[in-house]
Image (cartoon, coloured by chain):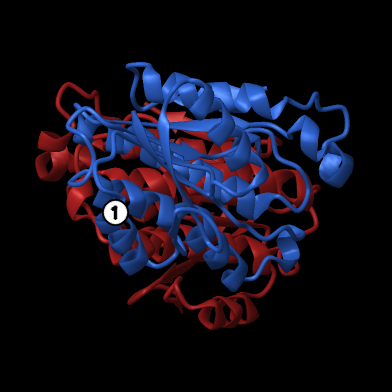
Chain colours: A blue, B red
């Protein structure tokens, strides 16, 4: 398949890239400051331009999402709005615009995360954004068929334990390779409206 | 208890009001255009003003939330933003500001809804907003203890079947009285971080 991979330069995006290439797929990489196409996912006009330039696409995979981390009492309206813009709105717009662009039986795979279900202190904006994305996936799936949309919900990556492990005491990390497999499951499988936990 | 009830004039708010009064609570009603206090929940400064004028509060109950309904392919970024502002941001800000205002063991009860889990066509913004609120509740609960925060997630009300029943084919509606009971459960109970489905 020809797959548009948004957030390809990040730790997760690079792992998804490698896995998809190893599965024989052709990848169009998209990133804010690197990749085949440049895209700030918070700008709907840039999403349109990226689809215009991407050509025929069978699947869209997103590994993009920025949210702030702060105690809930310090989490100002601008912080939650930043999380909404950084992880929710752009991914939703990738799907909305993509329905008219990708293959008739194409798929969208979005990124969410464990904090929607298993919170950590300072993680309320991440949790909120993840919960929004997951519920959107269930909603959009029933409208866009036969196109499909799923989400991948990893816990902390083994490769991120050095940076963030202290925020996840006692949580078993997962290798990025396993997270990338969940993208394969979404893209090559037939389900829709699913959230695939990787724990 | 002395309870701040936001959205008191709506169908749900009126039912919650009646039930809480019958349980012996004292209610400060808050609404956009009626009630003891006036509040546009999308304006953080008005939330501050409402708390300033409300006096001692033991619990905050919200029955307020507006979202647009449209097919997902017509749901523009401005529509999802409107849902975020109308149902998510204001309720989150009620909690954030409220932690410093309400009783040490006070509680917040927010409104979400069935569309986070069981979607209907045109309901993707509602689903997204509900998923955001529910994940926030789980996150905030672990930070604000011994204060508590829960959400009530009703399906379609019996009293709304005439207006919206066609969007919920085969779904058993619930009486507003049962939904109001879930607010009592949250306010008078001891749990936190819960989403109480009323189905």
Residue at point 45% right, 69% down? B30
Work out whether residue A29 or residue B101 is closer to the camera in this orientation and state it: A29
Task: Give the side of residue B101 with respect to residue B163, left or right.
Answer: right
Work out whether residue A199 or residue B88 is closer to the camera in this orientation and state it: A199
Quarter-wise, where is residue A197 in the image?
top right
Residue at point 88% right, 41% down? A162
> In which quadrant will I find the C terminus of chain B?
top left
What is the number of callouts on the image?
1
Work out whether residue B80 or residue B198 is closer to the camera in this orientation and state it: B80
Q: Secondary structure at mark 1?
A: helix
Picture coordinates of residue A158 (x, y %)?
79, 30
Residue at point 52% right, 31% down? A152
Q: Indicate whether B100 appears above or below B171.
A: below
Quarter-wise, where is residue B178 in the image?
top left
Residue indicated by mark 1? A51
> In which quadrant will I find the N terminus of chain B?
bottom right
Picture coordinates of residue A114 (x, y %)?
64, 34
Q: Decide if residue A81 is in sight here.
A: yes
Task: Give the side of residue B152 with respect to residue B175, left or right.
Answer: right
Other residues around mark 1 within 10 Å, as few (<14) / some (14–19) / many (≥20) = some
Q: Indicate whether A80 appears above or below A64.
A: below
Residue at point 44% right, 64% down? A42
Work out whether residue A148 or residue B139 is closer to the camera in this orientation and state it: A148
Task: Give the side of residue A136 with respect to residue B192, left or right.
Answer: left
Quarter-wise, where is residue A47 in the image?
bottom left
Mark 1 — on which chain does it sit?
Answer: A
Q: Indicate whether B61 appears above or below A181.
A: below
Q: Decide if residue B179 is in sight here.
A: no
Picture coordinates of residue B103 (x, y %)?
75, 60
């Amino acid at each position: 398949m020809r797959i548009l991979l948004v957030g390809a330069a990040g730790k997760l995006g690079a792992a998804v890239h490698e896995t998809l290439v190893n599965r024989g797929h052709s990848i169009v990489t998209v990133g804010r400051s690197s990749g085949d196409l440049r895209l700030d996912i918070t700008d709907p006009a840039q999403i349109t331009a990226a689809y215009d330039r991407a050509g025929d696409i069978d699947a869209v995979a997103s590994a993009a999402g920025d949210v702030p981390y702060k105690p809930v009492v310090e989490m100002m309206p601008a912080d939650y709005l930043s999380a909404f813009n950084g992880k929710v709105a752009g991914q939703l717009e990738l799907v909305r615009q993509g329905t008219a662009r990708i293959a008739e039986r194409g798929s969208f795979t979005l990124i969410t995360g464990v904090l929607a279900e298993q919170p950590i202190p300072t993680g309320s904006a991440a949790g909120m954004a993840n919960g929004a994305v997951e519920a959107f996936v269930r909603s959009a799936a029933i409208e866009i068929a036969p196109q499909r949309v799923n989400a991948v919900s990893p816990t902390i990556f083994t490769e991120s334990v050095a940076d963030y492990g202290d925020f996840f005491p006692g949580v078993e990390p997962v290798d990025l390779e396993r997270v990338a497999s969940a993208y394969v499951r979404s893209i090559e499988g037939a389900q829709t409206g699913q959230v695939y936990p990787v724990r």
